[in-house]
Image (tube, rainbow, N blue to C red):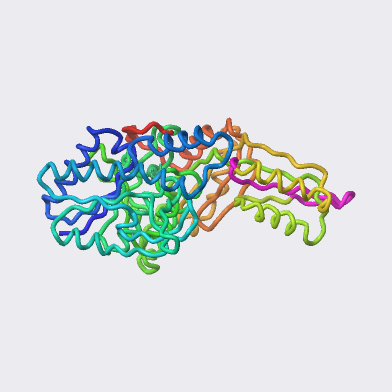
Amino acid sequence: MSLIVSKFGGSSVSDAASINRVADRIVAMKTQGHDVVVVVSAMGDTTDELIDLAEQVVGSSEPPQREMDILLTAGERISMALLAMAIDSRGVPAQAFTGQQAGLITDASHGNARIIDVTPGRITECLGTGSVAIVAGFQGVNPDANDVTTLGRGGSDTTAVALAAGLGADVCEIYTDVDGVFTADPRIVPTARRIERITSDEMLEMAAHGAKILHLRSVEYARRFGVEIHVRSSFSMKEGTHVITPSEEEEGEMEAPIISGVAHDRSQAKVTCVGVPDVPGAAARLFETVAGAGVNIDMIVQNVSVAATGKTDISFTLPASDVALVRAALSLLADELGYDDVLYQDDIGKLSLVGAGMRSHPGVSAKLFGSLRDAGVNIEMISTSEIRISVVTAADQLDTAVRAVHTAFGLDAAEVEAVVYGGSGR
Ligand code: ASP
Ligand code: MG
């Protein structure tokens, strides 16, 4: 008998029929003798619809964040209550709990709160009576103000991993609408393969660079607390992908594949400051200003300065949704820093090749760049970590680039494996 935490995403509980299907699955786990804690997302596109509604009500002004959190947490309350009823009606006792009742304690940052403690006493009690505990994902409570908070879009994954860590669960299952983590997005690369095992380090790089299957913070959490995640489909009984955190010793013994997968990201933009004086402190001033606007940047490239002018160009990438913030902040800096111009470009794409094996295998970059050359793709920027190489390309060349690189590294499956079962992709 084990203790399992299972999270079901919005597309797995999008209507009454799917809630019944999930209930059957949980009853089957119970019948096998497991203790089960279930974390649910809001039904289907509920969260998006609630956001749309709020926008309609407040017009062009920003909705107050505290009330926004109260609104959005309603979505998960609906699905948790319905699922508990569905399980109960099958003769297995079940009780639903809000994030607050389940002991998910967070800081006060509404809309993007961080979990600071998990005190799942009521969940343990519930399991002790032989019931299934259903927990509303994506939410917690800030104890100082006793206010409801949310963990950021996609945050139910993090709820599940945090509960699994807090309860000492054997595994945290994340049920979604695809069969696991694939070597590339099957919508772009139909021959993408399901990855059987991936380390949390590699999964972090994939998630941070565009793979949308897991909430980035859930992987960080799992890595920190050594929680094993099993990403799998709620639409099939197939084995999915195990995200594991091996100890250093275990990692040494593991035969790591050189490359795990290719992630892509279309949500970035590029900013170029043209003709920045090449003097000490210029970059510091520039990026202090960007940081001051609360914007996270990713890649940075500084050109060699032109001797005649003593000026240089500095480019960086950032989420396209933050361009307006940076534009406002940089316009105040023009006189002080004395650059010639700022260019904004959002028609870019980023490809990231991830694999722990590249640490010890020479030639990975050469092969990557060679495959892009053969596909006629121009590289605009390059950045690397120990286990990742990323390149920026033109947006309309990104799909070609992803396919070429996937093939060059031998990742294509002999036959099509990937099935996307549901979800609106919204
Ligand atoms: N319902 C929330 C969202 O759509 C949380 C989640 O699904 O994980 O972002
Ligand atoms: Mg999600």
* Residue 1 x %, y %: 15, 59
Ligand 2 positioned in quadrant: top left
* Residue 120 x %, y %: 29, 62
* Residue 171 x %, y %: 27, 57
Q: How many dots with numbers?
A: 0
Q: Does 331 appear above or below 243?
A: above
Q: Residue at x 12, y 48 (%)?
A: 92
Quarter placement of the C terminus: top left
User: Which image quarter: residue 81?
Assistant: top left
Q: Residue at x 46, y 61 (%)?
A: 107
Q: Does 219 appear above or below 373?
A: below
- Asked whether residue 169 is in view, the answer is yes
Q: Which residues are magenta?
A: 303-321
Residue occupying the far right of the picture: 308
Q: Does 225 appear above or below 82?
A: below
Residue occupying the far bottom of the picture: 249
Q: Residue at x 61, y 44 (%)?
A: 322
User: Which image quarter: residue 414?
Assistant: top left
Is 151 or 193 nearer to us in this picture?
151
> Residue 308 lies in magenta, yes or no?
yes
User: Which image quarter: residue 374?
Assistant: top right
> Residue 31 lies in magenta, yes or no?
no
Is 330 or 69 nearer to us in this picture?
69
* Residue 272 x %, y %: 72, 44
Q: Horizontally, is 300 left or right of 313 in the view?
A: left
Q: Residue at x 48, y 52 (%)?
A: 110
- Asked whether residue 415 is in view, the answer is no
